[in-house]
Image (cartoon, grey):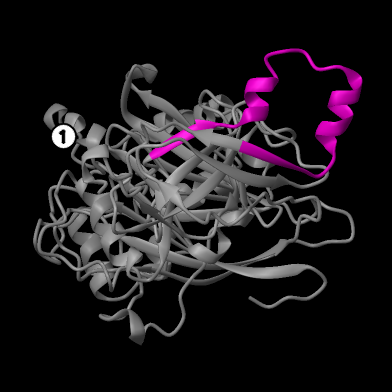
Amino acid sequence: MSHCDNNWNVKIYIVTWNVSTKFPENISLNKLLGLENRPEQDSHLPDFFVIGLQEVNAQPQNTLYNLFKDDLWTQKFKEVLKERDYVVIKTEQMQGLLLSVFARRKHLLHLRQVETEYTRTGLGGIWGNKGAVSIRMNVYGSSICLVNAHLAAHDHMLEERINDYERIVQEQKFHVKAKETIFDHDYVFWFGDLNFRLTGEATTSADEIRAMVARDELKQLIEKDQLLLVRREGRAFAQLQERLPQFPPTFKFEHGSNEYDMKRRPAWTDRILYAVNENNYRNVRLTAEQTSYKSHPSYSISDHKPVTSEFTLKVYEDTTERTVSFKPIELWLVGEPNTIEYVIPNGFEEGNADWIGIYRENFTSLSEYLAYEYTETYKDKQHQLNEQQLQHMQNTRTVQLTFSENVSLPLGTRYQLLYFQSTGTRGVTGLVGISPAFAVEKRCPSPSFDEID
C-alpha cells in the first residue's frame, strides 16, 4: 500500500460466475483467483476478493446443512484463501445468489459499518431465484457497495431486466447515514448474471454469432449487446461504466466443454460494472483503475464461463476512526469466570449492541466466534445516565467485562478477543479491536484433606 497524504491504493479482485447448480468437486480455483499453486509463489495479492455466484445449489436439504456449515462453494474458496491469510468478512445468500467478501487480515480493523441487503425480483418479488444481494462497507474511510445480481433470463425479456434493475436500485436501503442507497457510495461494483443478450434475433442466428466469435469479430458483435444499448439510451445501468468485454460471449456452453450450446444464441450475460463518485469529498478526487477484465474458458462445469476483474481504488484515511485496545490476558482459566480489560478511546461512539467475541487465533471468518458477551456499557445504557456520567462516557476509559464460567474453550490452542461495534438486528457491524493471543488453562485442583500428611 502506498501512503501519501493519507491516501492508499487498495486492490480488489471481483469474480462473477453462474455455477448452474454444480458443486465445486475436483476443480482448482487458483487460476480463477489469479493465484499460483502454492502460496509462497504468489507475487501480488489483492487486498480484497469479492466472490459473486449465481445459481448456487440451494435445495432444501442443503439449506439445512448451510445452517451449520458454509455452503460447499464458500468452503472451497475459503480453503484456498485462508492459506494466504484472508478472512471472510461477510457472506450474504438469497437462494441461489451468494456474495462473499474476503480481506487480508491486516485490514480487519479498518473495515467499518459492514451491512448486507437483498432484493427479490423473481415472480414479482415473491420468489428469490432472481434479484440481488449486496454488501456495503467502509474501507479506510471510503465507502464501497458491492452488488451481485441475477436478472430475468431470455432474449425477449429485456424490459423485465430493466425493471429488475430499477427495483433493486429503489428497494435497497442501508442504515448508514448519508449512504442509504447503492449510488450514495464512493465506489459501486455491480456484477452478476445480468442476462443481457444480443439484439437482432431475426437477423443474427446462433450459428452466425458463433461464426463471428470464431472470426474474432467481437467488436462488431458487442455493438448488438443489449446492456451497452440500454446504458447508451440511459434506460438502465447508466450511472455505471464498463470497459467493453474483449473476451468471447460467456453463455451458453455445453456442460464440460468449450463448445457453445446452439439451443441458445451466445451472449455476454456475465458482467462487471463499476461507478466512482469522484467528487464526494472536498479537495479529494476518488479514482478506480480497472487493471483486468477477462473470462476463464478453462472452467467448464457450468454452462457459463466465470468472469473476473481487478481494480485499484484510491481510499482515504478516516481520521475519526477509533480502535479499542485490549490489556494483555495473562491467564484464562477454564470453568471459572474470566474478567478482561479493554480501553475505549476518547471520542469512540459505542453502538447499542456492542459485543466481544472469543475466536481461535488465526480465525478465518468473522462468523466463527466461539462465545460472546455484550459489553458492560451496553448493559448500563438500559438505565438512563445523567449528564455527568454521559460526559465521562466520552473520555478515554478502561472497562472490565466478565465472561461466565460456562464458556468452554478447548485447551491446547490459543485465542483472541474481537470487539464489534454493532447496532444490532440486521444492523451495521464493524470490527474495532483485536486482543493479543492468549492461552487457556485449567486450574490445578487443590489437594484434598486426605492427601495431606
Q: Name, please, the residue furthest toward the front.
A: 453
How many labels were placed on the picture? Answer: 1
- Look at the image and tell me in which quarter the N terminus lies: bottom right
Residue drawn at point x = 11 percent, y = 58 percent:
25
Q: Tell me if 399 is positioned left or right of 116 in this view.
A: right
Image position of 207 with respect to 240: above or below: below
Q: Tell me if 169 is positioned left or right of 73 in this view.
A: right
Residue drawn at point x = 23 percent, y = 42 percent:
56
Image position of 96 with respect to 218: above or below: above
Residue 87 at what x, y percent from top left? 42, 57
Image position of 217 with respect to 431: above or below: below
- The range drawn in magenta is 371-400
Residue drawn at point x = 53 percent, y = 34 percent:
402
Name the amino acid type tagged 1.
Answer: Asn
Q: Is residue 186 at all visible to an observer of this figure?
A: yes
Image position of 434 with respect to 312: above or below: above
Q: Which is nearer the eye, 268 or 18?
A: 18
Residue 428 at what x, y percent from top left? 58, 34
Q: Report the residue marked by disc 1.
A: 62
Q: Tell me if 158 is positioned left or right of 424 in this view.
A: left
- Reply yes or no: does residue 386 show up in magenta: yes
Quadrant of the image occupied by residue 445: top left
